[in-house]
Amino acid sequence: MQWVIISINLFVGLVIALPFDKQDVKIDRSDTNLTKKDEGAFKVYRIVPSTNEQLLQMIHLFENALSDEADFWHPPSTVNQTIDVIVAPEHTEDFSYFLDKHNYKYKVAIEDLKKLLVEKESKIEINRFLNDSRDFVRLNDDAGGFVSRLRMGEYYSYNVLVTWMNRIAEHLPNLAQTVDIGGTTEGRRIIGIKFGRDAPDKKIVVIDAGIHSREWTAIHTASYFINLIVNSRETDSQIASYLDHLVIYIFPVLNPDGYEFTRTERTNPRARMWRKSRSLEDCRFDGIENACCKGVDLNRNFGFRWGEVGSSHYPCSETYHGKSAFSEPESKALADFLTSLKGRLTGYITLHAYSQLWIYSYSHRKNTYAPDIADTASYLARRVAEKAVAKLSSLYGTKFNYGTGPEIIYAFSGGSTDWAKETLKVQYSYTIELRPTYEDWNGFVLDRNELVPTAKETWEGVKVVLDEIEGTWRTSKGFSQRLQGGDEPLVVPIKGPQAKFPELITAENFPLFPFTDQFNTGFELNPANKISMAGDLIVPVPGWGNFDMDSNLYFGNINFDAKVGYQIRPTNHLNIKPETLALLAQNPEFREARKKAKEVVVGRVPYGYEPIKCKPPYCNPFVHNAAVGVEVEQGDDSFFIGGIDFPLPLGENGAGVRFPLSGAVEQGTSPYAYAHGQAINPVSPFDLESIKDDYHINYNGRRRAPSKLTKEKSDLNETKRNFYKKFFDKLPQ
Ligand SMILES: [Zn+2]
């Protein structure tokens, strides 16, 4: 009877408070009734809430349903976004009734989950035995019977994975060590593997998986990475290079208790679909009874906005966030371990399934980013995510979305990556949701033949992050350390291992506008459309940057239009001196590399049509730039629209300050507008554009005779050469 009451409460009368109090009744739901003989089928419903009311009902259900009644694979997010929920056999009838009654758009995506599990997963080997040598494939170069390669495309017990990692560490001590970061509720140890020789100045990357028990694909992917590193360390130069330059930790199963529980009955949805840890049962009165359940969603238990959104305070929910932040030994162990790496931990990647997403911080609220969003660091995190999903897709065409949680799937708090980003300032902190897509309903039961491809493509994306970190490590070793605080210009090696042109020529390694801080923004309000004035004014404020105001004023028919202009704020983190750029500009290799470098967008020009682009490693803010735009205007007015952008030689040594202006005047009938923004009169303290290769001093210290020079030009160039020579002599000869 109580099941009926619960069902009514959850599915029919979602907002009705029940009139009686049963707080004294304690119902034990621990172990989710594994022994229970289920009559009927577990069904997966695919629901699309089409009104706010329906969405609120679903959110209420998500936050209050017990996981053995309704378990959300895809929690509610916004109106018209799909929700997937597994409903236990004894509740499907009530649930369908509820959906019909409230006119939900829905279908039953999986009629019988158990049947599907039997079909898909009974074919995949599940290894239960320790030291089963059939699982280890012997390599030719393995010494003394050491078997290091684990057969991929299958799932292994936690014991087998740990044994395997121990063997690797034992037999290849120069390559790897195992690490034990703590114990679990049931007394297992959380074991990971550490690759790469440690050194205090090496950057660290941590990759983990299996914080959610049922996400077996993620565990397989992390294991695949271990296998790949061990077995390709000598044949794959990229992996060899990572091992030289980085320290990489991989934890294939962060929640071994939960994982082992999902393996107990792999075709029983009550076991196989377990997401949480196996912590001791906790109780909470849910309005009807005092319900008690085991397990905490460890990825809602971290101390970042704990309990705020996307998690439940009911112990019987699959997203129960625990009694308090870090109440669980597993999340605490990981947090303590990551904290011990603070300062050197540059990459943290956690693997989940599923939806094909590359998520960066923060995920608790829309339009909320890590505090460093405006500076180079977080801008990089976003751009690297973009690059990673492109690279990942290049292998099999699998498309991933990237963004913060609420931007691409749903909001959640208490997750490990947001916590690491906020607390440890980890530059690249990503939650990756593997195959299949959000639209697929069988995410946790991937076809066997998709396991290895999933791992392979994910590695392609992860490599982008590793490359990025490895690149900055090299750069910092060779460049910025030498430069910080010194008065001498940066000496760029042109020979030897540090002379990595064109790899160094990236926007990340050098500030784009090294000499200026710029902050441009604008707001435009267009309340009418008969007579209008529009303008864009960027005022240079000494010591602060340019101030960009962009506005329209319209009179007549009401017409609302708001615009915001922006310019990314460049800062000179490396403290690069003008003289350094002068030196760089003389280096033919550098010039050649810069020619090949891709342009990046750095800001908008007047009237906001075409962004300003420049080529790394630096923008010369004084070069000519132009932009045009066409606007269709439905009013009966005529107008002029356009812009100019010119620098004034106000700075030190004649350096210019940009002073862009644009405007529009409208009167009468004119449905089209043409806008033109342009920067004229480039002003540069170095006149970089005019340094021709012919005038360069070559690297043997001898001058090349300029061929066709007038006396006047020759004298001028002599002065320039003397100016550059002062710094050129510092180059390693
Ligand atoms: Zn997950």
Image (spheres, helix red, strand yellow):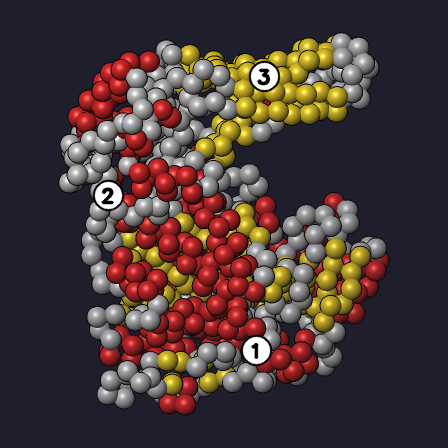
Q: Position of residue 323 (x, y in %)?
A: 46, 56
Mark 1 and mark 3 lie on one chain; the one further toward the N terminus is: 1
Specify whether residue 417 is in view. no
The residue that disc 3 covers is 643
> In the rendering, which numbered label is found on residue 448?
1
Name the element at disc 2: loop
Looking at the image, is mark 3 or mark 2 nearer the viewer?
2
What amino acid type should be assigned to the residue bearing mark 3?
Gly
**Numbered disc 3: secondary structure:** strand
Q: Is residue 447 above or below residue 300?
A: below
Mark 1: which secondary structure? helix
- Left or right, 517 with respect to 292, comes to left
Q: Quadrant of the C terminus?
A: top left
- The CA distance from mark 1 to mark 3 is 59 Å
Q: Where is mark 2, residue-wise?
A: 494
Mark 1 close to ligand 1, CB under 8 Å = no
Where residue 527 sits: x, y (%)?
72, 17
Marks 1 and 2, the one that precedes in the sequence: 1
Within 10 angstroms of label 1, few (less than 14), some, or many (20 or more) residues?
some
Q: Residue at x 53, y 47 (%)?
A: 404
Label 3, label 2: how far apart the Cα atoms are: 42 Å
Residue 52, picture quadrant? top right
